[in-house]
Amino acid sequence: MVFEPWEVYLFFSRAAARTKNYSGAELEGVVKSAVSYALNRQLSLDDLTKPVEEENIKVTMDDFLNALHEVIPAFGASTDDLERCRYCFWSQGFTVFRNGLSNFI
């Protein structure tokens, strides 16, 4: 199956929007989890000796979304916290927490 350029762009733009604040290792975990969902669709639990048709293994957006429910970012601030900080800094100006800092500003 060959994807159109707009389909590839749409997938990656959606994926990027959903993985803000993920580290590289966490993104790797999401991809591996999505691949496991795709593999599970091809496995037959009734006959484990049946070979898996590798050309039919396709990772879908549903696989990716299921993987995102499993792998959540462990470190870093949540998106809500980042937005709140951005609002505080840019709408109200910078706050000086220590007197020595005002010499640099």
Image: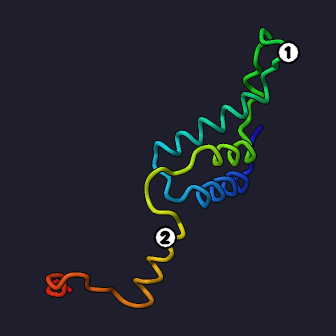
Mark number for residue 46?
1
Q: Would you place residue 49 above or below residue 32 in this image?
A: above
Instruction: Answer few, some or many: residues within 10 Å of disc 2's Cα (few below 14, many 20 plus, some between 14 and 19).
Output: few
In the image, what residue type sits under mark 2?
Asp
- Which of the pair 97/58 is nearer the observer? 97
Q: Would you place residue 30 above or below residue 42 in this image?
A: below
The colour mode here is rainbow
Give the number of the mark in front: 2 or 1: 2
Mark number for residue 15?
none
Q: Label 2 belongs to which residue? A: 81
x then y, percent, for residue 3: 74, 46
x then y, percent, for residue 90: 42, 86
Q: Secondary structure at mark 2?
A: helix
**Mark 2 or mark 1, which has the lower sequence index?**
1
Residue shown at the point (77%, 21%) measured from the top left: 53
- Which of the pair 96/16 is nearer the observer? 96
Instruction: Answer few, some or many: residues within 10 Å of disc 1's Cα (few below 14, many 20 plus, some between 14 and 19).
Output: few
Residue shown at the point (62%, 43%) measured from the top left: 70
Q: Give the position of the N terminus as an image quadrant.
A: top right
Q: CA distance from mark 2 to mark 1?
A: 48 Å
